[in-house]
Image (spheres, grey):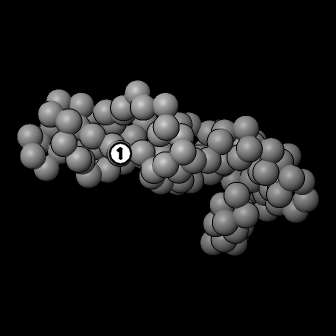
Amino acid sequence: MSSLVEVVLEEIKKHDASAVEEVELEIGELTLLGKEQCLFSYEVLSKDGPLKGSKLIIKEKKAKVKCGKCGSEGPIGRSDDPLDHLRLPRFSCPKCGENVEIVSGRDCIVTNLKLVVD
């Protein structure tokens, strides 16, 4: 979240804004960033300065994969193995079960800012 705040502060300077009203953030399912933790961190980091009183809006984006074998594209196929939480998960094609390439869901992106410009 500190990197996010730095990006927003840079945008404030670029647009000669005095404050921020809203920050829209898109969080991919595979980032392992929790919505509540992000909201709490943002609240702490934005309590002073041009971010004071601004609102963080978080949209979650589901992960998408593409299979190199059958060409299928879609959500991640997951195993029901109870040990998956102890090791790195193996993502598989929901159609044929082969390994896949992750197409989306790994990003954390500021998608929109509402700035106050004097």
Determine whether the residue tagged by mark 1 lies in a helix, strand or loop.
loop
Residue found 40% across the figure and 27% down from its top? 80
- Between 25 and 97, the residue placed more toward the observer is 97
Residue 83, above or below 33: above
Residue 73 found in image quarter:
top left
Q: Position of residue 41 (x, y in %)?
A: 79, 51
Q: Name the residue at 91% across, 59% down.
A: 48
Residue under the image location 66 percent in, 60 percent down: 4
Asked whether the viewer can see residue 111, the reply is no
Across and down, in percent, residue 36 comes to 73, 38
Q: Quadrant of the C terminus?
A: bottom right
Left or right relative to 116: residue 57: left
Furthest-right residue in view? 48
| Residue at the outermost left position | 70
Does residue 101 lie above or below 72 as drawn? below
Q: Please tell me which residue is depicted at 13% across the width and 50% down the height of the picture.
A: 68
Residue 37, horizontal then vertical, whole percent:
74, 44
Give 66 or 100, whichever is nearer the viewer: 100
Side (left or right) of 22 relative to 77: right
